């Protein structure tokens, strides 16, 4: 090996060492990306969750315009949630709200703000409409509950009260206090 080749190899060695040092300095100088401990880590647009019952039939369906997950407390925020609770006989209760929250398992859903609940007319029952706010729904148990004012209307019946517990499985509504009602315009 002549002195020219030795010098060339030495120069290449110096360039490689310098490049490695330069790259090492560049990588260590970059800030590391981190996930916020309080902010969201995921979101879904057009969420549509269908939960089957033990017989393999649709038990309930939860839809939302947007769902955002917060890992710090395993909470999901829902924009315009829409819940459909399907009874064994096929009757369906439709529950809508402005916004909501749910747990990781979606076994409890808090509907916040104005809440609208409807059950269309069936072969054996008239249509039912309930207006309330801040409703807690347990869709697997077919239950809903609030401490807020509620208005129930069906055919010519109108009932108002404070606090309601709705059991969709047997279609009973329990108003807790300040209950007033009218039937066919008569009090």
Image (tube, rainbow, N blue to C red):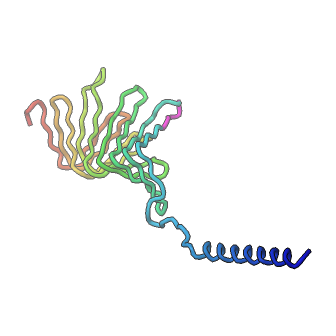
Quarter of the image for residue 20 reads: bottom right
- Residue 84 falls within the magenta-colored stretch: no
Q: Residue at x 21, y 38 (%)?
A: 152
Q: Residue at x 30, y 52 (%)?
A: 112
Image coords of residue 133 (percent x, y): 26, 49
Tell me how many marks there are: 0
Q: Is residue 14 left or right of residue 139?
A: right
Q: Main secondary structure of the magenta part?
A: loop
**Is 187 situated above or below 5?**
above
Residue situated in front as seen by the camera: 2 or 66:
2
Residue furthest out toward the top:
123
Image coords of residue 119 (percent x, y): 29, 32
**Quarter placement of the N terminus:** bottom right
Q: Is residue 178 left or right of residue 174?
A: left
Residue situated in front as seen by the camera: 123 or 2:
2
Image coords of residue 80 (percent x, y): 33, 46
Q: Find the magenta span and give its range.
A: 51-55
Q: Is residue 99 left or right of residue 55?
A: left
Residue situated in front as seen by the camera: 144 or 95:
95
Residue situated in front as seen by the camera: 99 or 118:
99
Image coords of residue 180 (percent x, y): 15, 43
Q: Residue at x 25, y 32 (%)?
A: 128
- Residue 54 falls within the magenta-colored stretch: yes
**Quarter placement of the C terminus:** top left
Q: Residue at x 40, y 32 (%)?
A: 86
Residue furthest out toward the left:
186
């Amino acid at each position: 090996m002549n002195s020219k080749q030795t010098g060339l190899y030495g120069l290449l060695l110096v360039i490689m060492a310098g490049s490695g040092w330069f790259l090492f300095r560049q990588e260590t100088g970059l800030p590391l990306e981190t996930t916020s401990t309080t902010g969201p880590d995921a979101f879904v647009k057009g969420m549509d969750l269908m939960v089957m019952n033990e017989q393999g039939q649709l038990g309930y369906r939860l839809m939302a315009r947007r769902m955002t997950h917060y890992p710090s407390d395993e909470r999901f925020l829902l924009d315009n949630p829409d819940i459909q609770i399907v009874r064994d006989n096929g009757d369906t209760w439709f529950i809508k709200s402005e916004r909501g929250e749910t747990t990781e398992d979606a076994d409890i859903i808090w509907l916040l703000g104005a809440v609208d609940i409807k059950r269309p007319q069936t072969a054996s029952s008239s249509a039912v409409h309930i207006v309330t706010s801040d409703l807690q729904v347990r869709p697997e148990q077919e239950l809903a509950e609030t401490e807020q004012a509620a208005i129930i209307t069906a055919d010519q019946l109108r009932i108002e009260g404070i606090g309601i517990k709705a059991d969709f499985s047997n279609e009973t509504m329990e108003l807790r206090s300040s209950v007033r009602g009218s039937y066919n315009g008569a009090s």
